[in-house]
Amino acid sequence: MSTNERRVGTVSRGIRCPIFREGDDLAAMVTQSVLEAAESDGFELRDRDVISITESVVARVQGNYASVDDIAADVKAKLGGETVGVIFPILSRNRFAICLRGIAKGCKKIVLMLSYPSDEVGNELVSLDKIDAAGINPYSDVLSLEKYRELFGENRHEFTGVDYVAYYGDLVRECGAEVEIVFANQPRAILNYTDCIINCDIHTRKRTKRILLEAGAKVVCSLDDILNAPVGGSGCNEKYGLLGSNKSTEDTVKLFPRECRGLVIDIQQRIMDATGKHVEVMVYGDGAFKDPQGKIWELADPVVSPAFTDGLIGTPNELKLKYLADNDFKDLSGEALKKAISDSIKAKDGSSLVGNMAAQGTTPRQLTDLIGSLCDLTSGSGDKGTPVVLVQGYFDNYTN
């Protein structure tokens, strides 16, 4: 083995940064933080390293905020301010409760239709075992609040301890609107109550909207239709509206970052100027993975990455080393095995390996989804103070 052979593959480092504020020069501060971390910890940047910035600091620096009253004004203007169906919201104090407050302030009555047994991202209202025991078919059966309580009683969220049915109902009433709560999974069920609807699902929103419009709904707005332009002097998101928003204060939401392609290009160029290295840069939000204990799928943002440099377009094109070792080269070992596998990797010509048996099980998800998930797990969602993550060696393989 040569003395200069690298013995470490992918490394993910959280980069500590200052607290970012509205109007800060984010590109300069991120570049400086990465360069100072490299000097402090004694590592060097390399070509194809990935610098990732969490979406929350991008939105904060952009000042992309809106108030409950801004949401209310937009909802009233777009849906008429009378009885509005609010369907398929996720169960989250951070993600949806503040949006619901704004929606409630813009209506006289809300018919809140919750999907069951869980919301779109896996937060349970009731267990599947209880659904089975009650003989309920969640694909067809519509339950009133009274029927839900009769069958299932109170169900508190496993992690937060919140009974979201009661919490959302109380929240709407506190904002001065009437509320009726029903449980259903077929979008058309809401049309028995109102023909003005906000569908709050994230990843299935286009299908839900299509079904409702085809079934005769008068007005259907997805969350990406609310605050997709400024209301007064508010922030907005032209592409995603309220999708990807988070609670900021009791009366304001921080919206998903607005167009930030220029930011990632700027940082890429600054690193090139400072080090001569061509790095990739991306903005990331939620990762895309499912928690086996709570059954929660992490991705409550509309996308993992709203902006990234061109080198992050596409999917991995990898061979499965254990397949090669167990099949093609099962009779080899030691240096001969290493050389055979290395030669197979070097022989890749860039064409797609989809369908190649030696690539099975390599999960060809989008690079930004994979790297963004790694970064989300690295930075955490609490007090680590590392809103920037440096990933090194991600594009290496066994031959590097």
Image: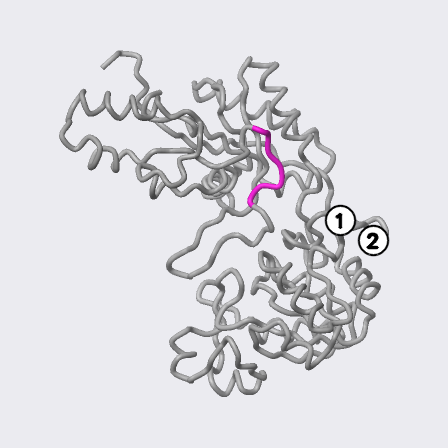
Q: Position of residue 225 (x, y in %)?
A: 74, 57
Q: Earlier in the sequence, mark 1 or mark 2?
A: 2
Extent of the magenta region: 304-310
Report the residue at 57% width, 29% height from top. Answer: 281
Which amino acid does the dot numbered 1 rest on?
Cys
Residue at which label 2 appears: 231
Contact between labelled residues 2 and 1, with CB atoms less than 8 Å apart: yes
Circle 1 sits in a helix, a strand or a loop, which is it?
loop
Determine the CA span between mark 1 and mark 2.
8 Å
- In terms of image quadrants, where is residue 102? bottom right
Which amino acid does the dot numbered 2 rest on?
Val
Q: Is residue 5 above or below residue 351?
A: above
Circle 2 sits in a helix, a strand or a loop, which is it?
loop
The magenta stretch spans residue 140? no
Q: Alpha-carbon neighbours of circle 2 within 10 Å: few (<14), some, or many (≥20)? A: some
The magenta stretch spans residue 305? yes
Residue at which label 1 appears: 236
The residue closer to the viewer here, 331 or 38, is: 331
Q: Is residue 33 above or below residue 56?
A: above
| Quadrant that contains the N terminus | top left
| Quadrant that contains the C terminus | top left
Q: Position of residue 60 (x, y in %)?
A: 68, 41
